[in-house]
Amino acid sequence: DLRALFAAGLVPGILAGCAIMLPALWLSRKHGFEVYSSQTRPPFWRAFWEALPGLFAPVIILGGLRSGLFTPTEAAAVAAVYGIVIGLFSRAFNLRAIFEIFADAAETTAVIMIIIALAGLFAFAGSTLGAFDQAANAILAFTQDPLVVLCLVMVLILFLGMLLDGPSIFLITLPLLYPVALKLNWDLTWFGVLMAVNIAIGQITPPVAVNLFVTSKVAGIPIEATARWVMWFVFSLAVVLVLLIAFPELSLWLPRYLGYLN
């Protein structure tokens, strides 16, 4: 159930957010990054009123998901349309800017879809030839200990996350790991959350660190300059991953409470 996966990711997402904020706050205070003590805060109510349209976005998304009005995938489309409408009414951009945004999005999506198509072909071929079942049996022949297998799988996912994008990793590895998860009686929703968190860690871990390319471009600095700082965030997110492995209910209690899981 996509709703169960979405709900299962809320608490881990909050934990991951805190795990990123804490080292960011510590590093900023220790090294004096971006100190603007002379600047005053804008009036609260004016800032709140200006942010109010944006604050409604999560209300619409979560409300629609909870009511069953749309799926998480459809929620992304609803959020995009809502953002365009708000942007037009607030004059944050014009119709020409929307065309440029669509062009950039189409270019990015085309690259991702090519990768997904090739990964899907690999997954189809492996499933048809039975290669994934043989690989799963080989893994289980090495050890039957669920914790050992899970640790090996997490190392594999982390390594792939350092090199590939998230959707490709899911398409390549899930046909292989799905039978392993079934044989070891892993909760699939919990395992999906573990994969998502682990891939997120891999995306900021050198040597490739896909997400760091975006960060360095926004900050206007070379990607090499981020390497010495990012490991603090990798470590803090790894702590969150360990907590989710040790305490599965951190991710499962909310979908159970909402009735998405038995």
Image (cartoon, rainbow, N blue to C red):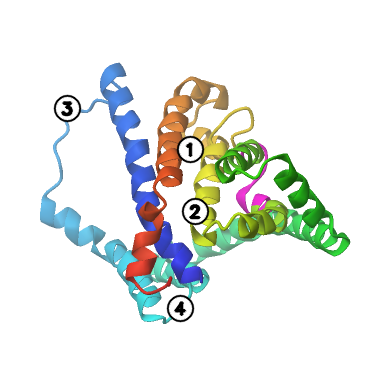
Foreground mark, 1 or 4? 4
Dot 1: within a 10 Å radius of its alpha carbon, few (fewer than 14), some, or many (20 or more) residues?
few
Give the alpha-carbon distance from disc 3 to disc 2, as whole Å.
40 Å
* For marks 2 and 1 on the same chain, the one whose residue lies earlier in the sequence: 2
Give the alpha-carbon distance from disc 1 to disc 4, as whole Å.
33 Å
Residue 21: in sight, yes or no?
yes
Query: In the displayed structure, would residue 162 be above or below residue 73?
Result: above
Judge by depth and name the residue closer to the eye, 226 or 123.
123
User: Dot 1 lies on which element?
Assistant: helix
Judge by depth and name the residue closer to the eye, 140 or 19.
140
Q: How many badges with numbers are in the image?
A: 4
User: Dot 2 lies on which element?
Assistant: helix
Dot 2: within a 10 Å radius of its alpha carbon, few (fewer than 14), some, or many (20 or more) residues?
many
Residue 89: in sight, yes or no?
no
**Residue 213: x %, y % from top left:** 57, 36
Q: Amino acid at mark 4?
A: Phe
Judge by depth and name the residue closer to the eye, 251 or 7.
251
Give the alpha-carbon distance from disc 3 to disc 4, as whole Å.
45 Å
Query: Which mark, residue 193?
Result: 2
Q: Amino acid at mark 1?
A: Val
Magenta segment: 161-169
Q: Which residue is mark 1?
A: 218
User: Dot 4 lies on which element?
Assistant: loop
